[in-house]
Amino acid sequence: MEFWHNPRCSKSREALAILREQGIEPEVRLYLDRPPKEAEIRSVIAAMGLDSAHDLIRTGEPDYKAAGLSRGSGEDALIAAMAAHPKLIERPILIDSGRAVIGRPPERVLELV
């Protein structure tokens, strides 16, 4: 299991604590320090079964507006923006065996356990 984590985010810390309470120690990826490549983002979108990359993006981040993004932005533009500005990626994300889930609420990570 890989856990895309931002230690400054309370939901991310909470989701990681839930996993650890279950005896699960995922590979923690500090995705702001080691941003995912576009192919990894595409893979996560597919693993979640999302209809659009926009469903994985944090629209309240200043980088979203600065990049001129909107719901109507193309998939390639959204994915490129997330790769260039990883703060735009919704968090936390747990990935396991071709499946993935956003830990919002944090208890959702248990869906993959």
Image: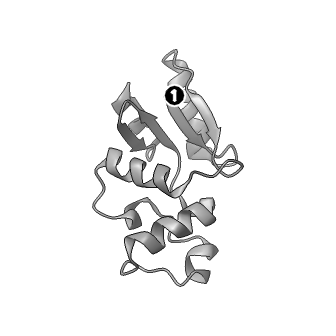
Image coordinates of residue 112 in percent, x first then y, are 36, 30
Q: Is residue 15 visible?
A: no
Q: Is residue 49 visible?
A: yes
- Quadrant of residue 62 within the rendered picture: bottom right
In what quadrant of the picture does the C terminus appear?
A: top left
Q: Name the residue located 35 percent from the left edge and 37 percent from the top edge.
A: 99
Q: Determine the secondary structure under disc 1.
A: helix
Looking at the image, the residue that sits furthest to the top is 23
At label 1, the amino acid type is: Ile
- Which residue appears at 62% of the width and 38% of the height? 29
Q: Residue at x 39, y 38 (%)?
A: 108
* 75 lies above or below 20: below
Residue designated by label 1: 18
The one nearer the camera, 107 or 75, is 75
Q: Position of residue 67 (x, y in %)?
A: 58, 80
Q: Is residue 21 above or below residue 27?
A: above
